[in-house]
Amino acid sequence: VLGHINHGKTTFLDTVSGSHSAPGEPGGITQNLRCFTTRVDTGAERGSAFFDRNRITFVDTPGHEVFEIMRGRAAEVADVAVILVSVEKGAEIQTEEVIQQADRFGVPLVFALNKVDLPHTHIDLARAELRRQCQSLFDKGLVS
């Protein structure tokens, strides 16, 4: 799970995992990678000892700009990158960066709009910003 600082990545993953990591983060900012695995009902039989189709592992990444290398390492090992964007703040600079990192490693992207339940959010604006960022990166030859 990648994205800009304060877009709710850790809180989102706390909800999925049933944990409470976000309140304990120093300064409210994730400063390391955190992984957890959860079971999902896919209807598929269990795979091999190394691959279980009924489990998914999430990697929580810091959103602050100084942690770019950590986000890159997470993108490198990911099967899919979930880019969380707060509709309260919209697409920001680290959003562009993680789009480029995922593209560099050939990782498919899933964009998730977060904080849609807050007042004064701008869902259409956040979508438009994401479209503009992706198109701009493509036009500049920075993503394929």
Image: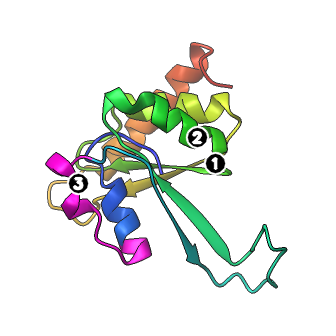
Q: Amino acid at mark 1?
A: Ala
Query: Which numbered tag is attached to residue 37?
Result: none
Say which label, 2 or 3, has the lower sequence index.
Answer: 3
Q: Between residue 60 and residue 12, name the one nearer to us.
A: 60
Q: Amino acid at mark 3?
A: Glu
Q: Amino acid at mark 2?
A: Ala
In the picture shown, does residue 31 fall above or below 25?
above
Q: Between residue 109 and residue 1, name the one nearer to us.
A: 1
The answer to whether the residues at label 1 and label 3 have Cβ atoms under 8 Å apart is no
Can residue 76 be seen here? The reply is yes
Query: Rounded to the nearest whole Å, what is the CA distance between mark 2 and mark 1?
Result: 5 Å
Q: Find numbered disc 2 in the image and state the secondary structure of the residue it sits on.
A: helix
Magenta segment, prevailing SS (helix, strand or loop): helix
Pointer 3: what residue? 25
Quadrant where the C terminus sits is top right
User: Which residue is depicted at the point 65% across and 85% down?
Assistant: 41
**Range drawn in magenta:** 15-29
Q: Is residue 22 magenta?
A: yes
